[in-house]
């Protein structure tokens, strides 16, 4: 992705390109990010923001679908050009389940790899019949040592608790079960992860958007959240 942008930037306004890769603008952005994140997360967030900014600079030269890939890290939180409001929750879940059986090759391998990282068991026992990520998570510590698996587990616990408190438990479990049935049952280990993603979508109107996107993250490269329409 960055190599493609580099080629396109050769014909862009050099002063504008420089503004997003060095100087006062980058210092300002880095300072703003550092108020919310510590290293190494702050460095990764700055790099992501720079890539997206450069993508916007050359957007008119890019295929719309390719630009959507570049902009994806911010698409649901800071809607970009061409943004459309998400469809009804039931529609999103239905489209997600339609796409699950289509997972093959490199797309499936990436889902498996991301799911493996996110499902590293936190220091708590798993809920019977659910993936390790569904375990009750310990309080998330502050600082750069926070493991993404703990954040994933905490987001899943929040989804479960919110489903209970909003009297949606039965429908929440139904969405989860249907997604697990639709996922490939071939030993790839993504069945439970699909259920977690569907559960996050089902609770999207009551959970912070960053938690919804985190629960969906294993499938984000195969079929981005914004494509579920």
Image (cartoon, helix red, strand yellow):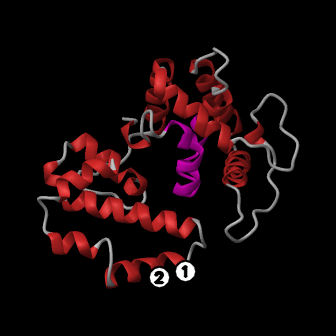
Q: Quadrant of residue 221?
A: top left
Q: Residue at the location (77% across, 38% down)?
A: 132
User: Of the numbered discs in the image, which one, if any, rests on residue 35?
Assistant: 1
Is 36 in front, or is 154? Answer: 36
Q: What is the count of numbered marks?
A: 2
Quadrant of the image containing the C terminus: top left
Q: Main secondary structure of the magenta part?
A: helix
Q: Residue at the location (67% across, 18% down)?
A: 187
The answer to the question of whether label 1 and label 2 lie on touching residues, with beta carbons closer than 8 A, is yes
- 216 drawn magenta: yes
Left or right: 76 in relation to 182: left
Q: Residue at the location (59% across, 39% down)?
A: 114
Dot 2: element: helix
Left or right: 156 in relation to 207: right
In the rendered image of this protein, does residue 13 appear above or below residue 6?
A: below
In this picture, which residue range is highlighted in magenta? 197-219
- 217 drawn magenta: yes
- Residue annotated with mark 2: 31
Dot 1: element: loop
């Amino acid at each position: 992705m960055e190599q493609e942008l580099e080629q396109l930037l050769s014909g862009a306004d050099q002063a504008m390109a420089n503004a997003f890769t060095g100087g006062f603008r980058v210092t300002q952005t880095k300072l703003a990010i550092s108020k919310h994140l510590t290293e190494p997360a702050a460095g990764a967030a700055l790099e992501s923001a720079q890539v997206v900014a450069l993508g916007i600079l050359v957007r008119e030269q890019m295929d719309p679908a390719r630009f959507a890939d570049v902009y994806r890290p911010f698409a649901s939180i800071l809607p970009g050009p061409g943004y459309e409001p998400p469809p009804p929750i039931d529609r999103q879940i239905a489209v997600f389940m339609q796409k699950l059986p289509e997972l093959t090759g490199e797309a499936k391998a990436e889902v498996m790899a991301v799911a493996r990282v996110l499902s590293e068991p936190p220091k708590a026992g798993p809920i019977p019949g659910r993936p390790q990520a569904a375990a009750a998570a310990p309080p998330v510590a502050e600082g750069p040592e926070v493991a993404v698996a703990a954040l994933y587990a905490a987001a899943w616990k929040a989804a479960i608790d919110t489903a209970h408190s909003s009297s949606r438990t039965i429908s929440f479990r139904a969405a989860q079960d249907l997604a697990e049935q639709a996922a490939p049952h071939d030993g790839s280990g993504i069945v439970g992860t699909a259920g977690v993603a569907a559960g996050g979508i089902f609770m999207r109107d009551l959970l912070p958007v960053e938690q919804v996107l985190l629960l969906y993250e294993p499938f984000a490269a195969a079929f981005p959240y914004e494509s579920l329409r």
